[in-house]
C-alpha cells in the first residue's frame, strides 16, 4: 500500500556504474527520494560482453517483482491488523513468466502467500489478498495490465 497522497509524486535517480568502477558492464545504482539506495546488475552475456553484467546484484525486473511482493504483503498485513486479527507473519513467493519477444513484459504472475497468526480466519486472509489486488496495491494493479495475476495462500498457526 502506498502512503503517498493522490497527486503526489515520487522520484528516483538511476546511475550507470559500469562494473566495479569501470565504464564497462551493466551495473546501476538507484537513489530513491526517501534516501535509500538499490543496486542492480545484469546477467553476464558471453556472446556480447559489453551488453552483459557481472551478476553482482538483482536484475532490474527482479526488483519490479520484489517491489510488487512488498507492496501486496504490506497491504495484506495492514488489512488484517485493521480487522483486529492476530497476524504474526506474512511472506509471498512470486513466480513470473515473461513474453518471448521485446518488450519482454510479464505475462503471468502467481503469488503464493504464507500467512501466520493465531486463529486467523481463512476468509479474512482471502479478503485481504483480494482487496490488495483489486484496490490498494499499485504495483500489482499496474502489472495486471500486461500479466494474468493469480494468487493462493496457506495459513500457518503460531
Image (spheres, rainbow, N blue to C red):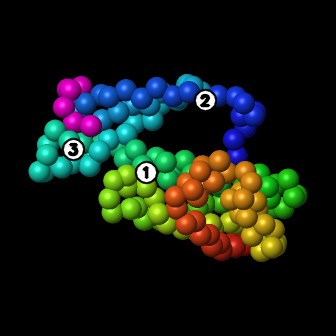
- Magenta region includes residue 100: no
Q: CA distance from mark 2 to mark 1?
A: 20 Å
Q: Residues within 10 Å of mark 3 (few under 14, many from 20)?
A: some
Quarter of the C terminus within the rendering? bottom right
| Residue under pointer 2 | 10
In the image: residue 24, left or right of residue 38: left
Q: Residues within 10 Å of mark 2 (few under 14, many from 20)?
A: few
Specify the principal SS of the magenta part. Answer: loop
The residues colored magenta run 20-26
| Residue under pointer 1 | 62
| Residue under pointer 3 | 52
Disc 2 is placed on an element classified as loop
Which sits earlier in the primary sequence, circle 3 or circle 1? 3
Disc 1 is placed on an element classified as helix
Residue closest to the far left: 47
Query: In the image, is residue 90 above or below residue 156?
Result: above
Q: Residue at x 58, y 65 (%)?
A: 149
Amino acid at each position: 500500500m502506498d502512503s503517498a497522497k493522490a497527486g503526489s509524486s515520487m522520484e528516483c535517480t538511476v546511475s550507470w556504474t559500469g562494473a566495479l568502477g569501470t565504464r564497462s558492464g551493466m551495473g546501476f545504482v538507484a537513489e530513491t527520494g526517501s534516501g535509500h539506495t538499490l543496486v542492480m546488475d545484469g546477467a553476464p552475456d558471453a556472446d556480447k560482453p559489453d551488453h552483459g553484467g557481472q551478476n553482482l546484484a538483482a536484475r532490474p525486473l527482479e526488483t519490479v517483482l520484489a517491489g510488487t511482493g512488498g507492496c501486496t504483503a504490506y497491504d495484506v498485513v495492514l488489512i488484517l491488523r485493521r480487522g483486529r486479527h492476530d497476524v504474526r507473519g506474512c511472506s509471498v513467493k512470486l513466480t513470473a513468466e515473461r513474453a518471448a519477444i521485446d518488450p519482454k513484459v510479464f505475462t503471468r504472475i502467481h503469488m503464493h502467500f504464507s500467512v501466520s497468526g493465531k486463529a486467523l480466519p481463512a476468509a479474512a486472509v482471502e479478503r485481504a489478498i483480494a482487496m490488495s489486488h483489486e484496490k490498494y496495491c499499485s504495483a500489482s494493479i499496474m502489472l495486471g495490465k500486461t500479466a494474468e495475476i493469480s494468487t493462493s495462500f496457506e495459513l500457518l498457526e503460531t
